[in-house]
Image (spheres, helix red, strand yellow):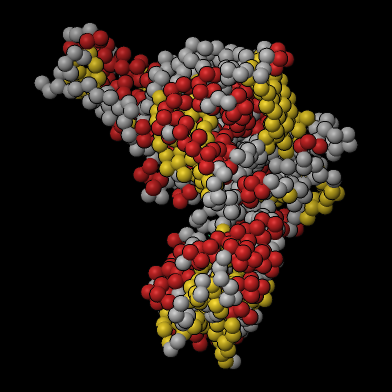
């Protein structure tokens, strides 16, 4: 008989399953879909930033041939949406920011819909605008949301220890104010939805780009006053998420209302300009940080006061303090921490969640002050970091338990591979030389959840696994694919358990009618949570298969294994029987049975109470990134030359996918630091196009040296941790430190666009 | 609203279509399409595609001038031997232009007629003392490129006129020209500022100096004060600084979403200095 050696898929370079289709241009996104009878939905947005709506006249639009419905706030139930339930899908009383939706049309064609929007007359009474969050609490400041007369949308407070005591024992105290700007996700697939009511049953199907289908279903049921059981969400392939599709936004219920009014499917897709204006941004922040240390480099305390511009309405951006808090309290050993944040309403646009969820902002502040303090006490900043970095087994002031922890290995690996310490002092010594181009090197580390985040009472994910008579596997998972490669890694984990090739798996992951519950794609959780869920389902299947095989083979299940599509003897790999044959014998026997398993995985983490203490994630991830830059002092251009990254990933599962994730994150972080910038003037976006909103392009991508620290997490799927957000987090902080190393100028305000850098170098304001 | 589409094959056909009035010429379309879609350009009733007019493409050396067909693409400029050999500054500007896709589509004629103060081929063409030939159903005329521009997006070309040639005299022996474009990233960027300096190198300095600037005034502009500051001077640190100062004073930049006027002036100063230091080094 043939023999099959033990083999493993873990750590291999496996191309994404959806790559061939995407590179061939065959993927059909929501943009490409057309349902029979489908109408085009379009939204009229205001051109005012703060105004009372006195009158809307839609009669001329209604009369336009080809127009099937024109809706305003008067035509729909007043059910505000969003995190604070402060955002009515169509605004009736007043508008609060430039993106505000005031009317919507459904028409035969895009041209007709556009023409109809032009025929809608709106009369406003302008109200004083509020664009500076620092003025939101001044007496007499305009009130944005009547329910919140003090303009405060959300507050977070947290403390451990006693910062007064910490400060008293400090030899050095530093204090800075950091400003972090507006950027946006720039998904290649713009926002879009199709709403379709089944004519007889009245059941609703929504074709949606959402990252959270099950939470969405519930949101929709509340807004529409509909039984959630009658709402089905199907996700066509999603052209990028990065957190932007984590909330419900006005355009979605608007499409549903239009479909309801017209009894036709309505498709509503943004233009690129609309995507810039009306999709969420990264949360801007003003961070005041005061920290201290002793002469020997021991950190003593952090006092944090953060002001967030909430914009006109509240989406997830307002809740980033939840994540920022983890960095302030627990990135390095912090004996005392006091933390206060406020999100205030203004007439600016509102922020949503965005890869990193506040951690870019927090890390920017923390890691710059680490360098400052090290310099103040005359200590090498790598040694300073190593002194304060945690080791496995430590519990932080916030109650996070660092079961596996590769923090120090991240620091030393990135430092050694980049020649950090030597270059740092050489660059500093070269600062005074006359050359216009200065070299700099900078480092930053980050801490982020790596095993989900229990921000809801459940952080679970369900899996259904089915093997057919030919040993083909259908993996039905609650976890959505948004381009991050979840289908591939989940299939890989299942194949690893069942000894099958990747080609043996089909993934079903995009229909709430079929897939089991999952909380959604966020918090870098899918590989960890959905991976554990899938492994559990595969193990149940394996157990069942080997139990039967043991009868056939006259061996115990422990003596058997599954390899290469066969049942084999574990000790020497000798083939006992091909798997399909065994499955058919099970199926067509007297006690006919199929191999179908289900599994629900709930991570061992804590849903924190009001004090925000507890072990919120099943594990944590670390990374250190070192950036090398060249600053052209004639122009202010900062060229990113090289990034040396070391990531504690638990264990490498799909090396190709992992590298892609890290590389993409680095470039996203680079864009945040160096070029991306939404320029607002009095609440209006001046650059809603890629021409003047500058994403990084291929020539700017730096050389990268990426190392993986395999800390083998005990709870992780095959030892892995989540890393989706991690690679974007350190970049701005590391680049800021590198600019300082090159020039001696500390940049506390993002972005580091050439003009901003030049201005700082000139000392001009 | 476009009512008529003419894919002209000859200059005469194109002029005929233009003579009806309210017509828009399309060459590569890389300005026309984005501008009309953004609502900044209203397309005329007749759309005249000149891409197939053979007589408008091609490059030739006739006598002592190079005749550049307006349909010459930016990619052609970058690659063509005549340009590389005689007008390398134009090839260099073409190399710094947009992305390969846009370079393949966009034409020199489009760049000239679009008359953007930031048009990247315009500064080198000013350095080369280029002229343009315009034709209408009533005849043809020639004018200096320097006199062609009227304001941002505006030129002295009349609605019925077609740009039929761009003519650059063969530079003298010893002629050197440099073009520096500043954008915030190396690829696919509209110039925030661009600077061109040219002249004949002699006695450690420049003679017959020509200086031009882009994106710092309503039109691409020549810099007479900077030219004057440089003419015949030995390129030492003091002369370079004096020229850089003259340059930053004679430009008239505005503040927009890409840069403030202050920064543009600083860039002009520093880029002029950089180019001159480079020229001085040889
Ligand atoms: C993504 C992108 C990046 C770009 N980057 C750059 C850049 O880096 N630098 C730069 O300078 N420009 C840039 N541009 C602008 C544009 O590509 C150039 O101006 C290009 O040279 C225009 O040529 P075209 O043939 O496409 O012109 P078209 O769009 O066809 O025409 C432009 C204008 O000229 C008129 N016209 C064209 N040819 C004639 C003719 N022979 N006679 C009369 N009128 C005529 C048209 O009616 C129109 O008004 C960019 C554009 C895009 C979309």
Residue at screen point 72% across, 45% down: A100
Residue at screen point 45% across, 41% down: A642
Give whichever of B149, A72 is nearer the camera. B149
Number of marks drawn: 0
Task: Relative to A517, say whether B119 is above or below.
Answer: below
Is residue A196 at all visible to an observer of this figure? Answer: no
- B265 lies left or right of A690: right
How far across and how far down the image is residue A61, in percent?
Answer: 72, 56
Residue B77 quadrant: bottom left
How far across and how far down the image is residue B209, in percent?
Answer: 57, 76
Quarter in which the N terminus of chain A is drawn: top left
Quadrant observed for ligand 1 in the rendered image:
bottom right
- A345 lies left or right of B9: right
Give whichever of B78, A296 is nearer the camera. A296
- A251 lies left or right of A31: right
Residue B37 quadrant: bottom right
Q: Residue furthest left?
A: A1
Give whichever of A7, A542 is nearer the camera. A7
How far across and how far down the image is residue B64, in percent?
Answer: 45, 87
Q: Residue furthest bottom?
A: B138
Give whichever of A359, A222 is nearer the camera. A359
Residue at screen point 66% across, 48% down: A762
How far across and how far down the image is residue A112, in percent?
Answer: 64, 58
Residue at screen point 58% across, 73% down: B233
Residue A342 quadrant: top right
Is residue A327 at all visible to an observer of this figure? Answer: yes
């Amino acid at each position: 008989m043939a023999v099959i050696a033990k083999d493993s898929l873990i750590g291999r370079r496996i191309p994404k399953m959806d790559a061939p289709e995407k590179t061939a241009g065959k993927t059909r996104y929501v943009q490409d879909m057309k349902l029979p009878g489908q109408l085009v939905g379009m939204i009229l947005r205001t051109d005012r930033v703060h105004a009372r709506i006195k009158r809307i006249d839609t009669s001329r639009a209604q009369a336009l041939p080809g127009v099937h419905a024109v809706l305003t706030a008067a035509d729909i139930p007043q059910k505000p949406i969003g995190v604070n339930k402060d955002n009515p899908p169509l605004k009736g009383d007043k508008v609060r920011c430039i993106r505000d939706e005031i009317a919507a049309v459904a028409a035969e064609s895009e041209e007709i819909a556009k023409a109809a929007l032009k025929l809608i007359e709106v009369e406003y009474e302008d109200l004083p605008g509020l664009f500076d969050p620092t003025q939101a609490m001044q007496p007499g400041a305009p009130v944005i949301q009547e329910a919140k007369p003090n303009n405060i949308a959300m507050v977070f407070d947290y403390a451990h220890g006693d910062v007064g005591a910490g400060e008293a024992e400090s030899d050095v105290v530093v204090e800075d104010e950091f400003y972090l700007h507006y950027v946006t996700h720039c998904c290649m697939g713009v926002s879009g939805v199709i709403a379709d009511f089944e004519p007889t049953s009245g059941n609703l199907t929504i074709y949606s780009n959402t990252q959270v289908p099950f939470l969405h279903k519930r949101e929709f049921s509340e807004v529409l006053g509909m039984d959630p059981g009658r709402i089905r969400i199907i996700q066509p392939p999603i052209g990028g998420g990065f957190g932007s599709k984590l909330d419900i936004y006005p355009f979605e219920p608007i499409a549903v209302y239009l479909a309801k009014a017209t009894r036709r499917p309505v498709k509503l897709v943004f233009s690129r300009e609309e995507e810039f204006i009306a999709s969420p941004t990264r949360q801007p922040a003003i961070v005041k940080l005061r920290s201290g240390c002793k002469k020997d480099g021991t950190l003593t305390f952090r006092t944090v006061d953060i002001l967030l511009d909430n914009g006109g309405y509240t989406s997830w951006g307002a809740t980033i303090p939840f994540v920022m808090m983890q960095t302030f309290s627990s990135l390095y050993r912090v004996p005392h921490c006091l933390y206060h944040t406020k999100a205030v309403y203004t007439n600016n646009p509102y922020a949503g969640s965005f890869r990193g969820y506040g951690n870019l902002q927090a890390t920017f502040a923390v890691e710059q002050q680490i360098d400052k303090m090290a310099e103040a006490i005359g200590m090498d900043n790598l040694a300073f970091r190593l002194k304060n970095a945690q080791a496995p087994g430590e519990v932080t002031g916030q109650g996070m338990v660092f079961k596996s922890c590769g923090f120090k290995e991240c620091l030393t690996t990135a430092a050694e591979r980049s020649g950090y310490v030597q270059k740092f002092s050489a660059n500093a010594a070269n600062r005074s030389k006359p050359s216009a181009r200065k070299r700099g090197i900078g480092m930053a580390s980050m801490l982020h959840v790596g095993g989900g985040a229990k921000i809801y009472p459940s952080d679970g994910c369900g899996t259904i696994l089915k093997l057919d008579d030919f040993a083909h596997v259908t993996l039905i998972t609650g976890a959505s694919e948004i381009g991050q490669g979840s289908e591939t890694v989940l299939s890989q984990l299942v194949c690893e358990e069942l000894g099958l090739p990747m080609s043996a798996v089909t993934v079903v992951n995009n229909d709430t009618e079929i897939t089991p519950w999952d909380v959604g794609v966020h918090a870098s959780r899918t590989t960890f949570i959905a991976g554990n869920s899938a492994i559990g389902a595969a193990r149940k299947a394996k157990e069942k298969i080997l139990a039967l095989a043991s009868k056939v083979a006259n061996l115990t299940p422990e003596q058997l294994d599954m390899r290469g599509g066969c049942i084999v003897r574990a000790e020497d790999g000798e083939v006992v029987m091909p798997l399909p044959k065994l499955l058919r014998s099970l199926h067509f026997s007297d006690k006919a049975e199929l191999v179908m398993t289900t599994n629900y995985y709930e991570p061992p983490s804590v849903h924190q109470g009001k004090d925000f203490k507890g072990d919120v994630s099943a594990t944590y991830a670390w990374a250190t990134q070192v950036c090398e830059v060249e600053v052209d002092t004639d122009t202010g251009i900062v060229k990113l030359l090289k990034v040396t990254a070391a990531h504690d990933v638990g264990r490498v599962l799909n090396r190709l996918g992992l590298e892609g994730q890290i590389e993409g994150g680095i470039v996203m972080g680079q864009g945040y630091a160096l070029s991306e910038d939404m320029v607002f003037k009095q609440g209006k976006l001046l650059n809603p196009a890629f021409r003047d909103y500058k994403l990084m392009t291929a020539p700017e991508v730096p050389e990268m040296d990426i190392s993986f620290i395999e800390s083998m997490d005990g709870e992780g799927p095959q030892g892995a941790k989540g890393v989706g957000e991690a690679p974007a987090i350190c970049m701005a902080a590391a680049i800021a430190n590198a600019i300082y190393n090159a020039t001696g100028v500390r940049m506390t305000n993002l972005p580091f666009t050439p003009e901003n850098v030049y201005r700082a170098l000139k000392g001009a304001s | 609203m476009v009512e008529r589409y003419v894919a002209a094959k000859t200059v005469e056909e194109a002029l005929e279509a233009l003579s009806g009035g309210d017509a828009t010429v399309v060459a590569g379309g890389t300005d026309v399409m984005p501008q009309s879609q953004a609502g900044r350009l209203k397309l005329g009733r007749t759309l005249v595609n000149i891409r197939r007019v053979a007589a408008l493409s091609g490059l030739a050396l006739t006598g002592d001038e190079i005749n550049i067909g307006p349909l010459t693409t930016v990619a052609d400029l970058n690659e063509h031997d005549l340009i590389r050999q005689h007008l390398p500054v134009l090839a260099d500007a073409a190399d710094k232009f947009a992305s390969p896709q846009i370079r393949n589509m966009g034409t020199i004629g489009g760049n000239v007629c679009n008359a953007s103060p930031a048009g990247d081929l315009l500064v080198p063409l000013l350095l080369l003392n280029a002229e343009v030939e315009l034709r209408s159903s009533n005849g043809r005329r020639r004018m200096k490129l320097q006199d062609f521009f009227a304001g941002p997006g505006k030129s002295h070309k009349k609605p019925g006129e077609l740009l039929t040639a761009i003519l650059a005299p063969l530079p003298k022996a010893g002629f050197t020209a440099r073009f520096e474009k500043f954008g915030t990233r190396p690829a696919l960027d509209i110039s925030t500022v661009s600077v061109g300096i040219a002249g004949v190198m002699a006695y450690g300095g420049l003679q017959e100096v020509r200086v031009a600037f882009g994106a710092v005034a309503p039109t691409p502009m020549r810099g007479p004060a900077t030219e004057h500051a440089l003419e015949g001077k030995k390129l030492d640190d003091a002369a370079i600084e004096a020229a850089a100062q003259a340059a930053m004073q004679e430009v008239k930049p505005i503040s927009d979403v890409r840069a403030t006027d202050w920064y543009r002036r600083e860039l002009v100063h520093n880029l002029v200095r950089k180019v001159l230091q480079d020229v001085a080094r040889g």
